[in-house]
Image (spheres, helix red, strand yellow):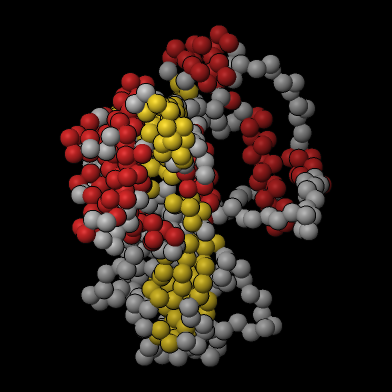
Amino acid sequence: MTTMTENASGLREFKMPDVGEGLTEAEILKWYVQPGDTVTDGQVVCEVETAKAAVELPIPYDGVVRELRFPEGTTVDVGQVIIAVEVAGAAPPVPSAPAVTTAAEPVPATPPSPAVPADGEPKSEGRKPVLVGYGVAESSTKRRPRKGAEVPPQQSEVFHAATAIQGELNGHGRPRPLAKPPVRKLAKDLGVDLTTVTPSGPGGVITREDVHAAVVPAPVPAPQTSVEETVTAARLQAPAPVAPYDAVRETRIPVKGVRKATATAMVGSAFTAPHVTEFVTVDVTRTMRLVEELKQDKDLAGLRVNPLLLIAKALLVAIKRNPDVNASWDEAAQEIVLKHYVNLGIAAATPRGLLVPNIKDAHTKTLPQLAESLGELVATAREGRTSPAAMQGGTVTITNVGVFGVDTGTPILNPGESAILAIGAIKLQPWVHKGKVKPRQVTTLALSFDHRLVDGELGSKVLADVAAILEQPKRLITWA
């Protein structure tokens, strides 16, 4: 499906595409063209930010820009027209229907898209969509005319709302709630009206827990009111007071894009998966020495060699020894999905917020290949060029809180993953080594895991294996 429409004058309208496989909106960060500019097929016209990444949008045809529908900083729904282009060689617009709105005319907030011909949207011969999920289908809504007395336009919405409320008060039009016979009997015994219960079961089925949760003292019934009284009360209702805001003493930042998606995902993860976190403090002196030796290795010349590289390799070896930890929970199917591949996520703090791109099939990579992938992943994230695809499909994640001088933490799982490993700061500390207290390089590791599919024994084995490898890195050879 394309993301453009064309009217009789040859004016093509380019719609906001779905650039992230299911995302519903994107913010326009920057326009690279202005009205009057000439554009060519494939030319980038703007940069947008979705909940997953910043993406550049190319225009799929040649022409002259006539209108930019939204300014920079505006969040636009997928499917809305964002730019209008007059295609090259098209007939000029009809004078009686000017394309440019004059100053005397009111500018609509969202200009309507022109009608699409009956045979479908125009297609560019031999051209394929530039982006995944290109465009959305348009739909229309029709309302049946209401019989009876006419209601003034300004009261129509209130009248319909009042009529719906009155219908509920009279007990008409309620759908039959979904519940099994034992649940219906329980509701009857407890005096619970199933039409007032919020279902939590699959497909909107009311469960026994829902019924018990609905057992509350019966409220005093409100007096019946007429439709006219309800309409009058709604019209006279005062708006809610606005909280005071001191612009000098406070700064308010809209929650959108990556930060909005991260917040939503973290809340969903925290209250969906039962988190368990285990900790271990380990002497990593030998690992730090190995890092310095690898920096001199010609096979790793020019690559990113640091403790994170060996910790990532240690986690991959631990997963190989304990493969059941690399899994996800399928709530709909009530199944545990074991992954026979490892897409290793690396949490990266960027100006746009926390991003977690992942290294695809990290379990198949050699140490030099893993170092190269880590370097590319971190550099791309910090430059804000991480693609949506790079942040999808992760199986386990590493987050390095030690770079901020933090000893450890209790990381929250990425949705759909079973485990996340936090690395604390590596510090010189007194440590008992070979019977004597000596200064050693020490760090604390924290492993959070989904207790629905990873029990304490499995989680402990994974964490213990990572710690053992970092204490004796030669195990990378014997255990790999």
Residue that protrudes farthest toward the front in the picture: 436
Image coordinates for residue 144, horizontal then vertical, percent = 54, 52
Image coordinates for residue 395, horizontal then vertical, percent = 32, 41
Check the image and report above or below for 9 versus 332: below
Query: Could you tell me which residue is drawn at 48 percent across and 52 percent down?
Result: 349
Query: Could you tell me which residue is drawn at 64 percent across and 34 percent down?
Result: 167
Check the image and report above or below for 210 versus 362: above
Relative horizontal placement of residue 229, taking residue 118 as reference (left or right): right
Say whether residue 315 is visible: no
Q: Which of 307 and 283 is in front in this view?
A: 283
Relative horizontal placement of residue 384, taking residue 133 as reference (left or right): right
Image coordinates for residue 472, horizontal then vertical, percent = 28, 34
Query: Could you tell me which residue is drawn at 34 percent across and 80 percent down?
Result: 41
Image coordinates for residue 353, horizontal then vertical, percent = 51, 53
Check the image and report above or below for 137 versus 424: below
Query: How many numbered dots are placed on residues in this image?
Result: 0
Q: Nearer the viewer, residue 418 or 171?
A: 418
Check the image and report above or below for 368 versus 85: above
Query: Could you tell me which residue is drawn at 57 percent across and 72 percent down?
Result: 71
- Is the C terminus in the top left, top right, bottom left or bottom right quadrant? top left
Say whether residue 162 is visible: yes
